[in-house]
Amino acid sequence: MIASTPPMGWNSWNTFGPNIDENLILETADALVETGLRDAGYRYLVVDDVWMAPERKNGLLVPDPERFSMGIGPLVQEVHDRGLLFGIYSSAGTHTCEDLPASYGFEQVDADTFAEWEVDFLKYDFCHTATGADPVALYRRMGQALRATGRDILYSICEWGANQPWEWASSVGAHMWRTTEDIVDSWESVSRLGFELQADLHPYAGPGHWNDPDMLVVGMHGKGHVGRTGLTDAEYRSHFALWCLLASPLMIGCDVRSMDDATRHLLLDESLIAINQDPLGRQGYRASSHGHTHGETWAKALADGSWAVGIFNRTERPGEFLTVGWELFGLKVDTAATVHNLSTGRIDHGVVASFGTRVDSHDVHVLRITPERT
């Protein structure tokens, strides 16, 4: 099965936007290996918009001859040689979002080209489609074309959640679908896309088909193409923890060649990645919320019978004492449980009914709560 767990990798857009070339891609591939990100699961290296030349050649998409002089096929091989998978970008319209040739009317031709290059992942946008165009029909055309190649290509669609893709995207062959507008590197954006827009989408996700609230901005610190105000380290922790609880695809958006220690440590957090990659494939849901006036609890069932629970302090108040009750995720209140606070390392046994912890402003504590056998 393609994408039996949420896809993990890196995408060029958040930091570099249209300013990409083969040297950047090769340096990023090396960095994914050298930093341990590849071995932690981040295997898809996705080249976003502006890789292609301004015109087709003999009806085929071709790379920009100056920025990708080696060609896409050889670049894919270089990426594969590093133990990574290669992703590429197109759009369901006549042109990409940056006004370069896209795949409308060329779906099978382009799918065959991608397969010939041994591409492993296609991000497929919705720019420059005709007014009133049916997204289901357009995305089905490329989904069918990809299947017809006989190659396993992860199909990631992006129409920004405008047409409720969670209700139909899996039926057109998509393995992940954007549920939101584009993310930017600000707490307001992360909060809206994560806390607000994902709350009711958990029934639609599972192995092979995932809701996608967009790429990570962890470690961007206000720099790059979607850089804005940046986030604090606490806010980046909340961002990453929420995406892990959501069983979201984890597509890094920062420059992995120059990560600071806090970014590297967070992106390599084995306990959080394990929650995201849990084979049960459940998306977390909002178990309780008092919005901006208090805390917020998200819960995710795990394959071993335990629960991953994120307690978020969305307020401006530091050191807020927040409590989670067993009833929020279906445990009987008299159930004794072991609570492992993954954020502090503390482990408590025999905890009954509820658990409380003090969480700083805009920060999170992630708990793994395991019912004890009696």
Image: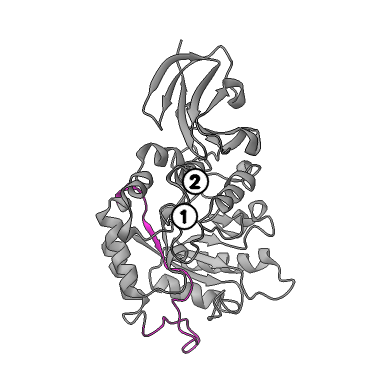
Q: What predominant SS class does the magenta segment belong to? A: loop
Image x and y of residue 228, in percent: 51, 60
Based on the picture, tell me whether residue 52 belongs to the magenta stretch: yes
Instruction: Say above or below: 337 vs 282.
Output: above
> On the picture, is 267 further left or further right than 361?
left
Residue that appears at 40% across and 42% down = 273
Residue that appears at 51% across and 20% down = 355
Query: In the image as oriented, which residue stretches furthest toward the front?
Result: 317
Q: Of label 2 and label 1, which has the lower sequence position?
A: 1
Instruction: Describe the element under mark 1 as helix, strand or loop.
Output: loop
Measured in 3D between alpha carbons, the distance from the residue under mark 2 to the one under mark 1, in whole angstroms, is 8 Å
Residue that appears at 46% across and 66% down = 13
The residue tagged 2 is: 239
Residue that appears at 44% across and 76% down = 51
Span of residues in magenta: 39-66
> On the picture, is 222 further left or further right than 189?
left
The residue tagged 1 is: 217
Image x and y of residue 179, in percent: 61, 54
Residue 210 visible to the viewer = no
**Are the two marked residues, 2 and 1, in contact with CB atoms closer than 8 angstroms?**
yes
Q: Nearer the viewer, residue 207 or 231?
A: 231
